[in-house]
Image: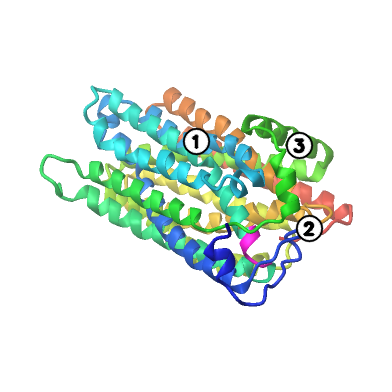
Amino acid sequence: MPTALETSETQQPAADKTAGRGFRVSHGIEALTFRRAAFASAMEGMTNGMLSLNAYVALKALGGERAGYEAELATLVTMLPSVAMLFASAYNAGGTVRRRRGYFLFAAVFGRMVFAAVPLIVLLPGLVSPFAFVGLIAFSSLICAGVPPALNQVWGANYVQASRGKRFAWISSVGMFMVMVASWLAGEFLDGSALVRGVANYQLLYPAAGVCGALALVTFYSIRVRYAAAIEVAEARDAKPLQRLGRAYVRAFRLLKRDRNFRTYEIGFFLYGVAFMMLAPAVPVLFSRYLHADYADFSRATVVTLQCTLMLVVPFVAWFAKGRRVTIVTASAYLVLIGYPAVLGVTAATGQMAFAYGAFVVYGIAMSGVHYVWNLGPVSFAKGGNPLPYTSTHTSLVGARALVGFPLSYVLMKLFPDTMWPIFIGSSVLLLIAAMIMLRLDRRMVGQGLQQFA
């Protein structure tokens, strides 16, 4: 039977001509989708904000620093969510969500409520505790790898093209703001006196994060997805998840082989990603070993400062990128990002928290540009008006980069235990090479008469 979302609205439907034959989305359906998605995104932002301290909790609260396993735990906690993106393509077929909307409930229970088990970790002996915590993070990341493509299907199906970008921007802003607020409050909470006698505050924080995350996904589940019957029939014959995953990577390989310019663009992005991922596990070790920072300083520098900078700078990036070729915008973002490992190096050398805040201001400025081209860069290469193969290939390569960048950072931390400069210098060199690749690609494409704008 049709749901209230599909039948209660009486407004005249407005067709989204780009969504495919059979799609009819009324203004009421779009408005109701937006309201529910805004609430769900706020809850998801709160969840991500609380979970942004995972690496520091593993080092501090769970004893990783005392046991001398800083490098191992920081690498695993930051790496595994990115590696899980290797499996995102298995969820990417529309039928996965449109015909089996229960995925959101599955992810709510097994991907989010799994954090309710964190208080039990303290009962485990010795080093088992922090590594069991890592296992929970890995399990949650794997289960929730399908959430981004699932939500992309919701936006594509339930919003008309004319308002899709604006509504997505508002929802993203809500989520970004809640990440910032929740991370700041989580840092203060973890530094504060125990709320319940005999129970560490992190043992209360993680069940709360699980409940917020589950509530977000249950709310997304309540949104019925509009789709074309013809597409539904085709998707019903789709393969099993592992077969879909294999097919997705075969298609990605063929696209990269066929489109030389896009392949070069992705090589540059791959090097940027390796550099970015080299720095991710180094940051919690830096704050723990060199700055001896508390949770509040860690959250304020790495999340609050970053999110504030992003919100302030994104409009300027949109102005800068307007009318400029995507290769130029991408190279510019990489060159600015070189300042991030440079200032982190100064932070390690001086032990001054002020430089850490400065590093994340630079990071936020650069990542405003990277975020822009991350979403719009691959689309600019699409031929025939179909960006899906390009965006899917671009997303799938996140996991591949994670298998290189994070282990490389770990090896450098073990080879040079008394200094982090090899990581900072190595990432800077990779970013410089990535920028040079983008500028060379730009010259080649201009010579070919191609003008891909961001």
Residue kind at label 2, given as amino acid type? Gln
Q: Which mark is residue 142?
A: 1
Provide the residue span drawn in magenta: 156-160
Looking at the image, is mark 1 or mark 2 earlier in the sequence?
1
Residue kind at label 1, given as amino acid type? Leu
Q: Position of residue 40 (x, y in %)?
A: 45, 58
Circles 2 and 3 in contact, beta carbons < 8 Å:
no
- The image's colouring method is rainbow
Q: Evaluate whether residue 251 shows in this view.
A: yes
Give residue 134's quadrant in the image: top left
Whether 210 is drawn above or below 366: the answer is above
In the image, is 304 to the left or to the right of 60?
right
Residues packed near mark 1 inside 10 Å, few (<14), some (14 to 19) or many (20 plus): many
Whether 255 is drawn above or below 386: the answer is above
Residue at x-position 77% and y-position 59%: 21
Residue on which disc 3 sits: 251
Please tell me how many numbered marks the rendered image carries: 3
How much space separates mark 3 and mark 1, taking CA atoms?
A: 22 Å
How much space separates mark 1 and mark 2, taking CA atoms?
A: 35 Å
Which element is circle 2 on? loop
Q: Nearer the viewer, residue 265 or 7?
A: 7
In the image, is 403 to the left or to the right of 281?
right
